[in-house]
Image (cartoon, rainbow, N blue to C red):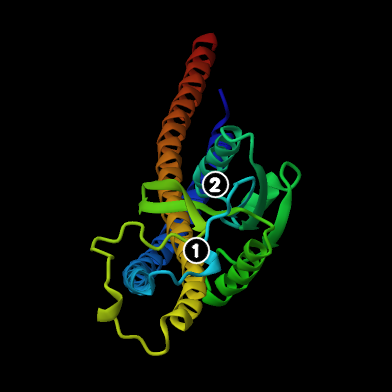
Amino acid sequence: MASIKEYNVKLKSLKNTVKITKTMKMVAASKLRRAQEAQKDAADYANEVNRLIVQIAGAAEVETHPLLESKPQVKKVLLVLYTSDKGLCGGFNNNLIRDVRLWMKDRPELDVTMSYAGRRGHTYFNKRQEMDTYYEGVTAKPDPMDAKTMSDDVCGAYLADSYDEVYLVYNQFISALAQKPNFEKLLPLQTDVDIPFDSKVVAKDFIAEPPIKELLNLLIPRLVVFKMHYAMLENAAGEHGARMTAMDNATSNANSLIDEYTTRRNRARQAAITTELTEIVAGAEAL
């Protein structure tokens, strides 16, 4: 059995740990609230932009855009992997990395290259998978300018036929307790996914200024930028939710250990008192 002094040292350490985990939980909760608001606003914007582009594309009939055209054969694929820069967020990164490995294992015919937004994904896959680009420090605070830089790189590579398809891989925010790994095809761009309305628009009923082709050339690259930024927002909300949950669990575990070690310390103290009393009584009887 440990001594009373050792138990006191352990209890002091655990109480300091509880202070840290409680603080980190509050910070994560504050960041999560802001991230959720940004994510919700972005989701509403995404729906309206998709609606507009589908209407324009429907009116354009034969008009198209290079980012909408599928390649005849899919062989080279780029995965843009979003993870966090920091840890202490439970299985947030590990679950996503595991799903990426399974996804690639199920598609051995594909030549997969990866780009990374987030240090955790880069650290794991750096020596295991061919890398295109590492975007450092872009996931902690999602910024549209970072998304613009990433979009320019990805679109340029796709138009140059470096890749046949491009996927965004990130944790979709469900709740603070749940984040779902999501594989979203970015290119060729699919603008008619989950749009709850009839996208068939008669060209003669659609009036556009400037011409429809110019509108597509303007809107579609912006939609790619936005999709990449939205993935950042989803990933950030999921990270803060996972960290808040992890810190809450850590606090609960630390409190349980405090109760356990307090009981053990009390037993050790009682044993020491009993031993002293026994020695006193034995000494008195000897006299």
x then y, percent, for residue 40 = 33, 67
Q: Nearer the viewer, residue 199 or 181?
A: 199
Q: Tell which residue pokes out farthest to the bottom in this image.
A: 209
Residue ID at (58%, 54%): 71
The answer to whether 153 appears left or right of 215 in the picture is right
Q: Amino acid at mark 1?
A: Leu
Q: Amino acid at mark 2?
A: Asn
x then y, percent, for residue 91 = 50, 42
For disc 1, the marked residue is 68
Q: How many marks?
A: 2
x then y, percent, for residue 241 = 41, 54
CA–CA distance between discs 1 and 2? 31 Å
Secondary element at tag 2: helix
Q: Is 39 above or below relative to 15?
A: below
Identify the mark nearer the N-term, 1 or 2: 1
Q: Quadrant of residue 104?
A: top right
Q: Nearer the viewer, residue 22 or 284?
A: 22
Q: Tell which residue pokes out farthest to the top in this image.
A: 286
x then y, percent, for residue 158 = 63, 62
Q: Nearer the viewer, residue 119 or 18?
A: 119
Secondary element at tag 1: helix
For disc 2, the marked residue is 93
